[in-house]
Amino acid sequence: MIEQFIIFAIVGLSGLFMDFLVTWVLKERVRLNKYIANSVGFLTAATSNYYLNRVWTFSSIDPEIAREYFTFLAISVVGLAINTLILYILLERIKLPSVPRESKMRFYLSKLAATAVVTIWNFFMNFFITFS
């Protein structure tokens, strides 16, 4: 399980890069709402992570790919809800006097913290449900 978690984390880093890139483009360049940009980035990464985790982390040969994908996606959507809730709490409820409320750095640090929590959620749920 430890080796799988390490591989899952490596796959997650590629997803993290994709998530942050898509989120940044949509939030900063397209000027979408930060929560919508976050959701699109997160779900884009979840889709690529499914494929990489299926092939590399869990070596799944389950022929029911659609069921497996939608289970993975459902777990990711719950992860997205957790991610968004953490973002909301860190951005809107916790007042850090040394960091301005609308600081871009604050948003991305909060997103990083949320991503760390969701990584643990996603690994265990996928280990015990999707790829069991």
Image (cartoon, helix red, strand yellow):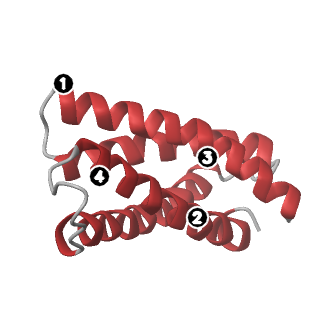
Quick one: SS at disc 1? helix
Q: Is residue 63 visible?
A: no
User: Disc 3 residue type?
Assistant: Gly
Q: Nearer the viewer, residue 128 or 20?
A: 20
Task: Give the side of residue 119 with respect to residue 30, left or right.
Answer: right
User: Disc 1 residue type?
Assistant: Arg
The residue singled out by tag 2 in the image is 122
Give the total of numbered labels.
Answer: 4
Q: Residue at x 30, y 70 (%)?
A: 85
Q: Give how far apart the Cα atoms at labels 3 and 1 are.
A: 24 Å
Q: Residue at x 76, y 41 (%)?
A: 55
Mark 3 residue crowding within 10 angstroms, few (<14) / some (14–19) / many (20+)? many
Expressed as whole percent of the image width and height from the top left, the position of residue 4 reads: 82, 56
Expressed as whole percent of the image width and height from the top left, the position of residue 130 reads: 66, 64
Mark 4 residue crowding within 10 angstroms, few (<14) / some (14–19) / many (20+)? some
Q: Give how far apart the Cα atoms at labels 3 and 4 are.
A: 22 Å
Q: Earlier in the sequence, mark 4 or mark 1?
A: 1
Q: Give how far apart the Cα atoms at labels 4 and 2 are.
A: 24 Å
Q: Give how far apart the Cα atoms at labels 1 and 2 are.
A: 29 Å
| In the image, farthest residue toward the top | 29
Q: Are marks 2 and 3 in contact (CB under 8 Å)?
A: yes
Q: Residue at x 87, y 56 (%)?
A: 3
Task: Give the side of residue 86 with respect to residue 12, left or right.
Answer: left
User: Disc 4 residue type?
Assistant: Arg
The residue singled out by tag 1 in the image is 29
Q: Which mark is residue 106?
A: 4
Expressed as whole percent of the image width and height from the top left, the position of residue 35 reads: 21, 53
Q: Is residue 38 visible?
A: yes
Q: Earlier in the sequence, mark 1 or mark 2?
A: 1
The residue singled out by tag 3 in the image is 12
In the depicted structure, whether residue 41 falls above or below residue 6: above
